[in-house]
Amino acid sequence: MSTKRAHRGRTGFTTGACAAAAARAAATALLTGTVPDAITALLPNGQRVTFTVVDPELRHWSATAVIVKDAGDDPDVTDKARLTVTVAWVATPGLFLRGGEGVGRITRPGIGLAVGEPAINPVPLQNLADNLQELLGLYPAINQPDPSKLPPPQPDAICLRDALPPLSCGWEVTIAVPGGEEMAKRTLNPRLGIVGGISILGTTGIVRPYSTAAFRASVVQAIHAARAQGSDTVVLTTGGRSEKVMMTLWPELPETAFVQMGDFVRTAFDAARSAGIRHVIVGAMVGKLTKMAQGMPVTHAGKGEVDRALLAACAQEVDAPAEVVAEISAAETARFAAERLAELGLAASFHRALAQRAWTTLRRKFWPGRSRWLTIQTIDFDNCPVARVSDLDGKKP
């Protein structure tokens, strides 16, 4: 099931992509009476990928399908996880989603999901709904069950009423990951207040091996290629979302100047120095930016925690109330700080304070020298630019 990308190691698929594919396979069984051996599913990035379906089961009003996750060359704790999805007819029209065995549940704010909900991020959730919508379009003549003979959705199901075409019945989709609770012990989920299992994640559907030597080599190669093609500026981002924002802010730069460094901060800055780059622009959200402000050479979640004292100091600097500073000191995520301060109208000043700390640390540890320039651009969780800190004062190098 895995794909290959030159020089970056073998890519794999996210838990979200696997869950969407399993849901599509199970729903196909309900509509056709046969569980397919393989299913071609739509990924969030628009690609279509064929997954092998294992251990299918078709019952009277429900069907279950399993997709075994292949994480490629990324040492992901969820590699080989069995994304198990059951789709069942229910009496109420619409689409209803549940987290089953091995899927975590949110118990604290600051994750971007409501407390009490299963840990299924918005992009995978939408991707699952898109796959089921598309599938229903392929089978316009549906023999729906009599709603009076069907059970209602479970009380803990999330209702996505507009996610399916109007039907007299609805679908309840339950995502489970057998063994997920044990897998989650090797992640930050318990510390973040996600209990009972793993998170269903993924913004593109593809897992790229950010933590491999092959990816580090690709970052170095991309920076040297940008310089070789005439650019003395590179824009370093931590992933695809931040890169898209940065491309809109610096449209005059060639595409080759934009490099996704992933978690490898020191690798990227070392390569920029050796390549003769004069101006480094960094685009990041608060979590990764906090770790840069801490001076961490690798910002992967498994390499260290965010410095809550640093976040609290930023909050104090922008005159946040003492009780809010205390909350941030006790929270486990940078996102909590950003969201809490945004509620008080302090988002821009907080982002600027954090960006200034990141700028100072990166300048000192990884990017010294008067003949070089550094710009930090912060991005919020809605993919909007917030604050910028630079030693260029609006001038180009």
Image (cartoon, rainbow, N blue to C red):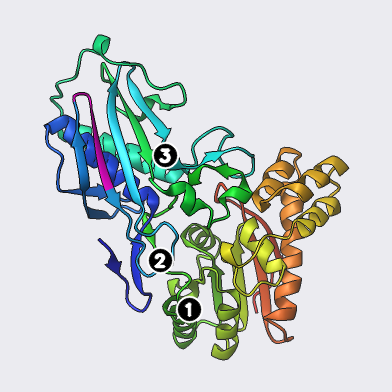
Residue shown at 84% from the left, 40% from the top: 323
Identify the secondary structure beneath mark 2. loop
Q: Name the amino acid type tagged 2.
A: Arg
Left or right for 264, reference 334: left
Disc 2 target residue: 208
> 10 Å neighbourhood of mark 2: few (<14), some, or many (≥20)?
many
The answer for how far apart the CA atoms under marks 2 and 3 are is 27 Å
* Viewport quadrant of the N terminus: bottom left
* Nearer the camera: disc 3 or disc 1: 3
Q: Nearest the camera: 67 or 259?
A: 67
- The secondary structure that most of the magenta stretch takes on is strand
Number of numbered markers = 3
Task: Point out the tag, 1 or 2, that comes first from the N-terminus.
Answer: 2
Q: Nearest the camera: 367 or 67?
A: 67
Whole-percent x, y for residue 301 in the image? 58, 62
Disc 1 target residue: 216
> 10 Å neighbourhood of mark 1: few (<14), some, or many (≥20)?
many
Does residue 394 appear in the picture of this structure?
yes
Identify the secondary structure beneath mark 1. helix
Query: CB of mark 3 within 8 Å of CB of mark 1?
Result: no
Residue shown at 45% from the left, 21% from the top: 155
Whole-percent x, y for residue 119 in the image? 50, 42
Label of residue 101 in the image: 3
Identify the secondary structure beneath mark 3. loop
* Magenta region: 60-66
Question: In the rendered structure, does residue 305 fall within the stretch colored magenta?
Answer: no
Residue shown at 23% from the left, 37% from the top: 26
Using the rendered view, name the quadrant where residue 5 is placed: bottom left
* Viewport quadrant of the C terminus: bottom right
Q: Name the amino acid type tagged 3.
A: Glu
Whole-percent x, y for residue 299 in the image? 60, 67
Note whether 11 is above or below 90 in the view shown. below
